[in-house]
Amino acid sequence: MSHQVTVQPSGHQYAAEAEETLLAAAIRQSVGLPYGCQDGACGSCKCKLLQGEIELGVHQLKALSEAERAQGFILACRAKALTDVVIESHEVVGVGEFPVKKMPARVSSIEHLAPDVVRVMLQLPAADPLRYRAGQYIQFLLRDGARRSYSMASAPSESPQVELHLRHMPGGKFTDHVFTAMKEKEIQRIEGPFGSFFLRDDPENKPLIFLASGTGFAPIKAILEQMRTNADPREVTLYWGGRKQQDLYLHDWAVQQCAAMPHLRFIPVLS
Ligand SMILES: Cc1cc2nc3c(=O)[nH]c(=O)nc-3n(C[C@H](O)[C@H](O)[C@H](O)COP(=O)(O)OP(=O)(O)OC[C@H]3O[C@@H](n4cnc5c(N)ncnc54)[C@H](O)[C@@H]3O)c2cc1C
Ligand code: FES
C-alpha cells in the first residue's frame, strides 16, 4: 500500500510505498529532496512533518536530536509513511536530473596515492553512460545486500571511466576487500548517481569555501575539475585537512590547480 507525500512549499506530490523511506521514494521519482548519506548520519535530509504519521528508523543524534524530533523534524532517509503525509522541505534543483541506474563496473586500475588511500578507476558501460554532477556519489552493491558509498573524484566527461578515492578502514567489509583482494578487471555492481552536494549556479558569483578532510577531498576534486573546464569565475578557497602530510594525498595536484585556476586558493591544514 502506498501513501501520498506532499512537499511544501513547492506542493510537489509523490507516492511512497509502505516499505520505502520518504527519501527513497523521492529519489525513485526524481523529486529533489536534499540528502547526503541516506543512512541517518549526516542530517542533510532533515525536514519538518506538518501532517500525518511516520515511523522513524534508527539514526544518529547528531543528525536529528531529541529536541529537534520534539519540534516535529524528521529525517526523510529514515522515515516511512504510515498515512498520507505533508512535509516541509526545500528542494534542490538538479537532484533528480539524471536517472539513478544500476550497472556493472569493471575495475580498470588500482593505484596507491598513500599507504591507506587508493585511486580506483572504474570502467562503466559506454553504451549507457553514467550521467552525474561533480560532487555526487555512487554506491557499490555488495553480495550480501550491503551498500558502500564513494564520491566521484573526476568531473563528468565523455569518458566511460570514473575515478574514486578509497581510504582503508581496517576491519571494514568493503575496504578490506579493496586493499587485500581487489584485482584489475574485477567486476562490481554499482548504482548512482546519488547526493545533492554539487555546485549551484549563482548569478552573483559569490566566493566559495570548500572544507575537506582525508578522502572528503574526492568530490571537491571533481568540482574543481568541472569549474576549470567551465572557466567558472568564482573565487574558491580550499581548506584540506589531515593528521599527517600523507593524508593530503594529492597535495601537489591541488598546488598545480592553483597555477591553472587564478581564482583558487589552497590552504593545507595539518593538525
Ligand atoms: C555519501 C558518502 C560518500 C562517501 N565517499 C567516500 C569516498 O569518496 N572515499 C572513502 O574512502 N569513503 C567514502 N565514504 C565512506 C564509505 O562509504 C565507507 O563507509 C567506508 O569506506 C567504510 O566501508 P567499509 O565497508 O570498509 O567499512 P565498514 O564495514 O562499514 O566498517 C567501518 C569501520 O567500522 C568498523 N566496524 C565495523 N563493524 C564494527 C563493529 N561491529 N564494532 C566496531 N567496529 C566496527 C570497521 O572495522 C571499520 O573500521 C562515503 C560515505 C558516504 C555516506
Ligand atoms: S541523515 Fe544523511 S541523508 Fe538522511
Image (cartoon, rainbow, N blue to C red):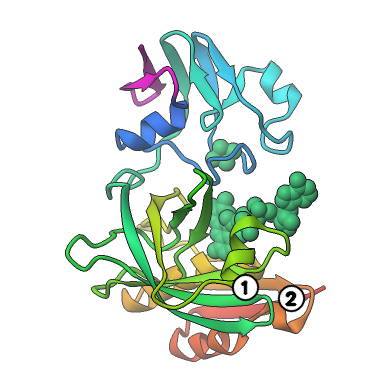
Quarter of the image for residue 47 reads: top right
Label 1: element kind: helix
Vertical relation: 38 (above or below) 188: above
Question: What residue is at 44 percent from the left and 68 percent from the top?
Answer: 223
Vertical relation: 71 (above or below) 44: above
Kind of residue indicated by mark 2? Val
Residue that extends furthest to the right in the rendered view of this protein:
271
Q: Quadrant of the N terminus?
A: top left
Label 2: element kind: strand
| Left or right relative to 105: residue 58 | right
Q: Position of residue 244 (x, y in %)?
A: 78, 79
Quarter of the image for residue 233 reads: bottom left
C-alpha gap between disc 1 and disc 2: 30 Å
Q: Is residue 218 visible?
A: yes
Vertical relation: 92 (above or below) 270: above
Q: Is residue 117 magenta?
A: no
**Label 1: how many Cα within 10 Å (few below 14, some 14–19, many 20+):** few
Q: Quadrant of ligand 2?
A: top right
For the record, the magenta segment spans 1-19
Question: What residue is at 53 percent from the left and 83 percent from the top?
Answer: 111
Question: What residue is at 29 percent from the left and 60 percent from the top?
Answer: 130
The residue that label 1 is drawn on is: 180
Q: Quadrant of the C terminus?
A: bottom right
Mark 1 or 2: in front is: 1
The residue that label 2 is drawn on is: 269
